[in-house]
Image: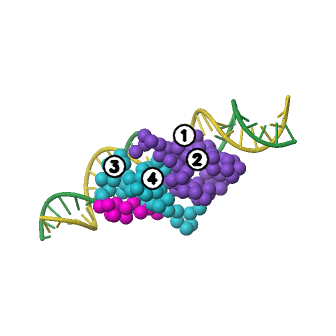
Chain colours: A cyan, B purple, C yellow, D green
DNA sequence: ATAAAATGTAAAGTAAACTTGTCTTTTTGA
DNA sequence: TCAAAAAGACAAGTTTACTTTACATTTTAT
């Protein structure tokens, strides 16, 4: 699974810490998700998508070999 | 967070066990997600959405008080 | 009404998400 | 070029997703 959180942040010039604060999670959580270290819950994914006025499916993508 | 997995299953006449098998998770995992006992990972949500030819955002919704 | 299938529930264990704290490395900007 | 800000990384601890097993309840079909 890939995600474009870093790109979405860059578009809006928002830091990991700012995103984290807005979502009420730790900066490390955002960092770890961004670099693919772990997979967020669907609840957090929905919040991330909403924050970026986007969708979960737009930000998180299955890779070819997945499913 | 709410989800419409039960409805999507009903549309296609698929049991929890069949869905679980297709997604390589246990039946209890599907059951627990359906009744809101726990929140799936984004990876599993993407697989569920794909199985139903739908989207995560269509199947999983934030409730009004969330975020 | 009865059997079989499907669903709900619960407990114990494992895996992984997430937190907090700390430190290093990279990037940014004056 | 230098300092500050941002990002990457690591470890230990907590919480929660998920598994397996097992059993109870509900639904479906005959």
Q: Tell me residue B35's x, y (percent).
A: 58, 40
Circle on res. A22:
3
Q: Tell me residue A27's x, y (percent).
A: 33, 52
> SS for tag 4?
helix
Judged by its main secondary structure, the magenta piece is helix
Q: Earlier in the sequence, mark 1 or mark 2?
A: 2
Q: Are the residues flagged by discs 3 and 4 in contact, CB closer than 8 Å?
A: no
- Using the image, name the chain to which the residue with label 1 belongs: B
- Using the image, name the chain to which the residue with label 4 belongs: A
Above or below, B63 against B42 in this view is above
Crowd band around label 1 with a 10 angstrom C-alpha radius: few (<14), some (14–19), many (20+): few
Q: Nearer the viewer, residue A31 or D27?
A: D27
Q: Are marks 1 and 4 on the same chain?
A: no
Q: Residue at x 60, y 59 (%)?
A: B53
Q: Residue at x 45, y 51 (%)?
A: A46
Q: Is residue A32 magenta?
A: no
Circle on res. A11:
none
Instruction: Please state the extent of the stretch shown in magenta in the rendering.
Output: A1-13
Q: Is residue A7 magenta?
A: yes
Q: Residue at x 36, y 48 (%)?
A: A23
Q: Quadrant of residue A6?
A: bottom left
Circle on res. B37:
1
> SS for tag 3?
helix
Q: Nearer the viewer, mark 1 or mark 3?
A: 3
Q: Is residue A38 visible?
A: no
Circle on res. A45:
4
Circle on res. B4:
2
Crowd band around label 2 with a 10 angstrom C-alpha radius: few (<14), some (14–19), many (20+): few
Q: Nearer the viewer, mark 1 or mark 4?
A: 4
């Amino acid at each position: 699974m890939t995600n474009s959180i870093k790109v979405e942040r860059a578009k809006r010039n928002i830091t990991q810490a700012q995103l984290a604060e807005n979502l009420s999670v730790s900066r490390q959580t955002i960092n770890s998700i961004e670099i693919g270290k772990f997979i967020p819950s669907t609840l957090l994914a929905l919040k991330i998508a909403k924050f970026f006025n986007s969708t979960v499916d737009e930000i998180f993508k299955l890779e070819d070999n997945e499913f």
